[in-house]
Image (spheres, helix red, strand yellow):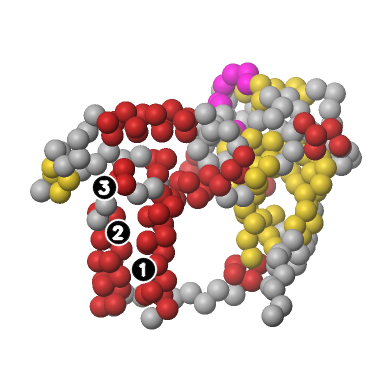
Amino acid sequence: MFRKKKPKARFFSLLPAVHTLHPITKADKLDRTWTKAERDDYRDRLSRCPVGKILENNTPQYPNSIGRCPAINSIMRTGYIVYAPADFKVHTNGDGHTILFTTTPFNPPSSDYVVLHETDVTKWLMDSSKDTTIDQVVKINTTWRVQADDDVVFLQTKVPFVNETRFSAVSGVLDPRTAYEVNVQLFWHVMEGDVTIKAGTPLCCYVPMSRKMLEDLDMSIDIATPTDYRLEEEFMFTAYNQFPENVNTTQRQIKTNKILKKYWNE
């Protein structure tokens, strides 16, 4: 039997020092300082809430933990994080338009480190956020380049759940088939003031995806069938048939996956 070939991709830096000091990392390597505090808080709330004593509509209500949410855990482990390779300062004066930069002597090969996209080009992205976002898009030219198999593209998105309010990455698709420079576009949210972005600050997340799935997915949009309602009953059963302290996230996912696969195969 032949094993299916794993898709391949490669990020490489034109400056070795950037690779050494601020390499692109898998998302699960990012240190989110709030996660430990959240776990401690959950354990404390769980110890103070005897199971079954709090009732709402005759249903036991247990302390919830965002850290045990499969969706949150999954998104925080998904993708690759690009970091600022060097410090830069941003000045805004409150008029919603003016934005000035101060950078170190560092510049990537063949380009300036921090630049702006033309307002006439990007203004159409700003209509719904003009009161909280500068009307020009900041572009960070990095030293990184990317190569990948033909079926691989990357979704560019903001880094999830890092409490970053000064900027957010613009959503888009990086297609290594047509462009290989890794340059990060940012919406800037500090309307007035001076802000320093330090080297090593997470800028964006790149999530690899299959080009074929984007272009040729057999998708249907339906009304629930009787089989779908049976699936719903079994799925909800897995949420309430064990006390939360007796099952971890992985164990719960194994149970729910078994049910989901059963009905999908039908």
Closest to the observer: 257 or 162? 257
Q: Amino acid at mark 2?
A: Thr
Disc 3: which residue: 243
Asked if residue 242 is among those painted magenta in the image, a careful observer would answer: no
Disc 2: which residue: 238
- Over which residues does the magenta segment extend? 186-195
Disc 1: which residue: 259
First in sequence, mark 1 or 3: give its number.
Answer: 3
Closest to the observer: 21 or 223? 21
- Disc number placed over residue 143 in the picture, else none: none
Local secondary structure at mark 2 = helix
Left or right: residue 266 compared with residue 169: left
Local secondary structure at mark 3 = loop
Where's residue 94, x and y in %?
A: 56, 23
Where's residue 134, x and y in %?
A: 58, 33
Q: Is residue 33 above or below residue 234?
A: above
First in sequence, mark 2 or 1: give its number.
Answer: 2
Asked if residue 187 is among those painted magenta in the image, a careful observer would answer: yes
